[in-house]
Amino acid sequence: MASTHGAEVLVASNRGPVSYEVIEDGSLLAKRGGGGLVSGLSAIGPETNAVWVCAALGGGDREAVRRAGGGLLPAEETGGQRVRMLDIDATVFSDAYNGIANSVLWFVHHMLYQTPLEPVFDAEFRRQWASYEAYNRAFAEALAEEAADGAAVLIQDYHLALAPRMLRRLRPDLRIGHFSHTPWAPPDYFRLLPDDIAAELLTGILGADRAAFLTQRWADAFTDCCHAVLGPGIPSGTRIGVHGLGADADFLRERAHRPDVDERMAALREEIGEGRRTIVRVDRTELSKNIVRGLLAYRQLLEDHPEWRERVVHLAFAYPSRQDLAVYREYTAEVERVAETINSVFGTEGWTPVVLHVKDDFARSLAAYRLADVALVNPIRDGMNLVAKEVPVVSDEGCALVLSREAGAYEELGEDAIVVNPYDIGGTARALHEALSLAGGERAERSKRLAAAATALPPAQWFLDQLGALER
Ligand code: F6P
């Protein structure tokens, strides 16, 4: 297919840099997001014709696509970026996003199944898989239409594992990269998938010139899966790369000192009470984040070390995520139940042991980062975990980091963190005690080293490196 629009750099991801809501008077409210891709695309400068292709996620987005006539969204709503949002049929989208991407691929890569009963790959799965293929095809076709001859296309994540190969067939001239933001499953777990599906996923990504990951561990797991499923060697000659996305220190430090953050700090100080230590966690309420075991470990700490009662508060921010899925709703309820139990068992007149907030508020998250004495990041498995990188950068007094060895961030931060097995409640409780007990000087030193490691590859450079690697 000939190029019609001539973009030289293209990004494709399920979630785009903007989302829309239809408000009461019928107008559209655009809400812009942040993250590595946004910084990256801003860094390449306006002289490069760049387009971001993403999916319409809900009714507001679909209305915005309709008002834009299916073309680029108005630049004033996207922060100047050229964004093409795809209005994929709502059922196809839901099957692909909720059904396959989030209920199968996410579960495989994060190893979340309770295997005696799941997964079940039946006729319903096959029906949803056809939607996942159609969703990937819609992206491949839009990218083929937008790209100039020889353009660079950076395709993101498990939602779009088939798109590289589909796009390669439509446009052999393009330079295609695929980036996985999740962990990659080891072969024994990956092979829970039906053999044909496992092979399709791998060959889909191998349609790219380069497949990149957040850590060497995930890159190696991908290569191991290729060997286990497809045989020795990487059949397509696809190059494998690693780009460990870091925290954006300049942005975070500036943003964390604005008045709205100061206001939130004052409110949090009220909730914490005078002179108490803080253990901070900030997550989407996501199964892989291991929030419930984090709370159980905190409870264990209060049992084993009564000297911390009244002297520490756990600030746990668990923001809604994927609430279309029953298992996420149930998990959210469990987080609330365990937090309430801790408060009713241990709480006193002037002390609430767990301060749980479930309403997403970025300024309040930054306020908690600034107040953190200890950051608790204990995922079952995580591609990177940027919270682990952000808290040491922002915390006012320097923080100790209790970090799961299963987070991608462990590769870079393990040395100065207090490392835990995320399933081990007793071990995590001991790590919390150790973190709370660290002498001020030692904590500040470690925090400084953590912040340096965490900011080694800022988002803009992370993106430019991937583009550069695609050119070579
Ligand atoms: O970690 C993979 C990822 O796609 C991230 O890029 C993103 O933060 C997260 O999952 C969000 O998922 P969703 O778009 O389903 O809310």
Image: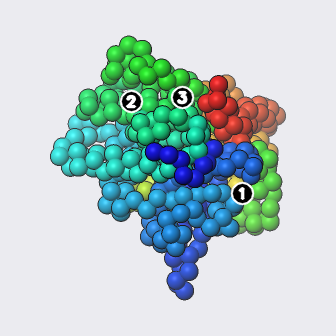
Counting residues from the start of the chain, the first of labels 3 and 2 encountered is: 2
Reply above or below: 412 against 371.
Answer: above
Are there few (<14), some (14-19), or many (20+) residues within 10 Å of tag 2? some
Q: Residue furthest top?
A: 232
Are there few (<14), some (14-19), or many (20+) residues within 10 Å of tag 3? many
Along the line of sight, the residue nearer the viewer: 382 or 4: 4
Is the distance from the Cβ of mark 3 to the nearest ligand 1 atom less than 8 Å? no
Q: Position of residue 262 (x, y in %)?
A: 78, 63
The quarter of the displayed image where residue 434 is located: top right
Along the line of sight, the residue nearer the viewer: 118 or 469: 469
Q: CA distance from mark 3 to mark 1?
A: 39 Å
Q: Which mark is residue 210?
A: 3
Which residue appears at 66% of the width and 64% of the height?
75
Left or right of 308, for residue 339: left
Q: Are marks 3 and 1 in contact (CB under 8 Å)?
A: no
The residue wearing badge 1 is: 367
Reply above or below: 54 against 109.
Answer: below
Counting residues from the start of the chain, the first of labels 3 and 1 encountered is: 3
Along the line of sight, the residue nearer the viewer: 306 or 119: 119
Q: CA distance from mark 3 to mark 2?
A: 13 Å
Three-letter residue code for mark 3: Arg
Counting residues from the start of the chain, the first of labels 2 and 1 encountered is: 2
The residue wearing badge 2 is: 202
